[in-house]
Image (tube, rainbow, N blue to C red):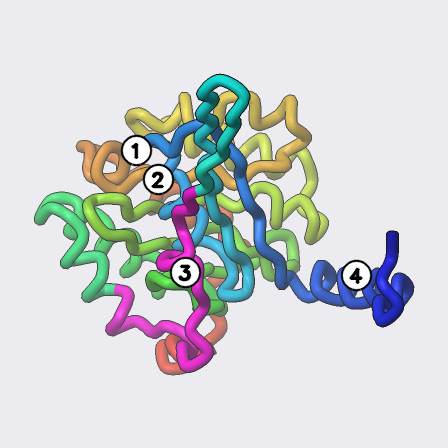
Amino acid sequence: MATADWDQEQFRQRVEANLAAGRFRLIVAVDAITEELKRTLRYLNEHSAADVQVLALELEYIADGDAEIVFPRTYGEELARPSKKRGRWDETALLRALEEGSTPEGFAAARCVWDLMTERCVRFSWGTGLNPGVTGYLMMDGIEQPVLSVYAGPDRTSSVSINFEWMAARGATSERLEQLAAQIRKLPGASERLAGLEASGFKRRPGLPVETVLSRSGAVDQIEQTLAELASSPASATAESWRTS
């Protein structure tokens, strides 16, 4: 039953506005919060927009005779709480986080990918999440496309995402995306990451872990070849504009 001071229409409008702006909290209710779930929550909060929170709610049920008790416990608020003072990341923070969170081999591979991006990308979009992230745009068939993103995570969780979903939404053809997928699958250990990609209508952004995929022999060379084939023209912006976009 609605209270006297509750406005249903106003509530509906506020919900619509928050969803449209990407401000919401997702709560996963479970019987038990496992370590695997904690890792998943950390990943989601690190790679989501600042105003998106993903939490877990554990509901432990205990019954003793006629007494029934539910003990709630939450996890994730300390991860998901957005910082209003946090601005956009930059190259210095990205490289520092990649180095601190990776093995020497992993950082070397990630640094090589970053150097390739600065050579080929026409624009960068820097993230504002809990950890540094950046999306690189390449010219494909006359359109700026957000081809790949680099996410610097702690404890060897850094990755490079291939943004098929975003490219499809910006007009990339299925033929072009199939060509890209074929090139990415040549990376050692990458094929399983792209499983079901075409069947989903390219509505996926598979991540390639720095440590287990990109640091393997030949992986960076394949990325270089892929970016060279994708780019329809040399990068048309200066290094300074890349870093400040």
CB under 8 Å between discs 2 and 4 = no
87 in magenta: yes
The magenta stretch is 73-94
User: What's under tag 1, amino acid-wise?
Assistant: Glu
- Residue at 26 percent of width and 42 percent of height: 210
Residue at the extreme top of the image, as rendered: 65
* 19 displayed left or right of 66: right
Residue at the extreme left of the image, as rendered: 104
| Place of residue 231 in the rendered image (x, y in percent of width and height, measured from the top left) | 50, 53
User: What's under tag 4, amino acid-wise?
Assistant: Glu
Tell me the SS state at disc 4.
Answer: helix
Q: Which residue is mark 4?
A: 16
Q: Give the alpha-carbon distance from disc 2 to disc 4, as whole Å.
A: 29 Å
Q: Nearer the viewer, residue 159 or 18?
A: 18
Q: Which mark is residue 35?
A: 1
Q: Give the alpha-carbon distance from disc 4 to disc 1, as whole Å.
A: 34 Å
Tell me the SS state at disc 2.
Answer: helix
User: What's under tag 2, amino acid-wise?
Assistant: Lys
Q: Counting residues from the N terminus, which is met first, the one under dot 4 or under dot 1?
A: 4
- Residue at 48 percent of width and 41 percent of height: 57
Q: Counting residues from the N terminus, which is met first, the one under dot 1 or under dot 3?
A: 1
Q: Counting residues from the N terminus, which is met first, the one under dot 2 or under dot 4?
A: 4
CB under 8 Å between discs 1 and 2 = yes
| Place of residue 61 in the rendered image (x, y in percent of width and height, measured from the top left) | 47, 27
Is residue 119 visible in the rendered structure shown here? no
User: What's under tag 3, amino acid-wise?
Assistant: Arg
Q: Nearer the viewer, residue 114 or 102?
A: 102
Q: Residues within 10 Å of mark 1 (few under 14, many from 20)?
A: few
Q: Residues within 10 Å of mark 4 (few under 14, many from 20)?
A: few
Q: Give the alpha-carbon distance from disc 1 to disc 2, as whole Å.
A: 5 Å
Q: Which residue is mark 3?
A: 120
Q: Which residue is mark 2?
A: 38
